[in-house]
Amino acid sequence: MAKIRSVVVEGDRESGYKRVHVLFGTNYFLEIIEDGGRVNFLLGAHHTGFKADASELKSELHKFISEVEERHPESAIEQD
């Protein structure tokens, strides 16, 4: 089942987004949560995954992305 199965957005542009949750593929999820002025990024499969702070430019998430790019350069992307 290779499709986006569910997208849930809590909040709006005017009052602020609090949570975005996406279910996709067979058992994968992506979640972005704002809590207390911090932004957390969660990515996983079924019951496992990881959480990283994404509040600042050189955040924990940036570190994880850099590590994945180094280990898997064939999958690295760049955006304009």
Image: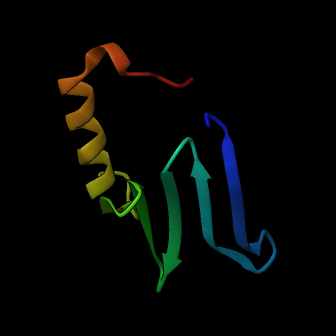
In this view, the residue in front, 55 or 64, is 64
Q: Quadrant of the N terminus?
A: top right
Q: Is 50 placed above or below 17 here?
A: above
In this view, the residue in front, 2 or 51, is 2
Residue 9 position within the rendered picture, expressed as x and y whole percent measured from the top left: 71, 67
Label total for image: 0
Indicate the quadrant where residue 18 lies: bottom right
Q: In the rendered view, how is the structure colored?
A: rainbow
Residue 62 appears left or right of 45: left
Residue 44 appears left or right of 31: left
Residue 8 appears left or right of 36: right
Farthest-out residue, top: 74
In this view, the residue in front, 6 or 33, is 6
Q: Is 12 placed above or below 58 here?
A: below
Residue 56 position within the rendered picture, expressed as x and y whole percent measured from the top left: 38, 60
In this view, the residue in front, 9 or 17, is 9
Residue 79 position within the rendered picture, expressed as x and y whole percent measured from the top left: 53, 25
Residue at 56%, 41% in the rendered image: 25
Residue at 68%, 50% in the rendered image: 5
Residue at 57%, 23% in the rendered image: 80
Residue 32 position within the rendered picture, expressed as x and y whole percent measured from the top left: 52, 64
Residue at 60%, 63% in the rendered image: 21
